[in-house]
Image (cartoon, grey):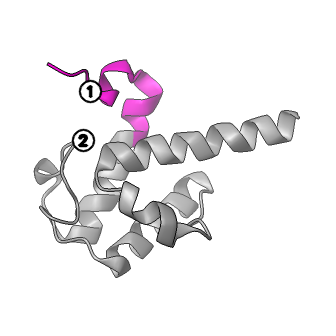
Amino acid sequence: MCASPTDSWGDAEWAVYERVRAFVADAADAKLEDVEPHTDIVKELGVDSLGFVLIFINLEDEYGIAEPENFDEIGPTLRTPADIVDFALDVAREKARASNG
């Protein structure tokens, strides 16, 4: 059995996931319980490009993480809430390194 990326998550990652989960449920007009870390938000929940915009508006409001300029390139890699959490945390870490740099 393959290890899941969420296996290494700590409290901070799970806290971000709970917020991302709510953003995805809102964008998909779905019930919160229908959103799991590895739910394919496009195929299973029907999130479209406007849904992704809404998710990123929420990420920016909550964490200061704007939709990336290269979203056309990375968008297809953000298929699950876990992918979005990992992306958001990577951006936050990069911002922290740059400000401490």
Q: Amino acid at mark 2?
A: Pro
Image quadrant where residue 37 sits: top left
Residue drawn at (12%, 61%) of the image: 44
| Residue 13: x %, y % from top left | 43, 31
Asked whether 96 or 22 is in front, the reply is: 96
* SS at circle 2: loop
Please say if the residues under marks 2 and 1 sit with CB atoms less than 8 Å apart: yes
Badge number at residue 96 = none
Image quadrant where residue 3 sits: top left
Residue drawn at (72%, 44%) of the image: 95
Horizontal placement of 55 versus 39: left or right?
right
Horizontal placement of 50 versus 60: left or right?
left
Up-down relation of residue 65 to residue 3 (above or below): below
Q: Which residue is mark 2?
A: 37
| Residue 31: x %, y % from top left | 12, 59
Q: Which residue is mark 1?
A: 4
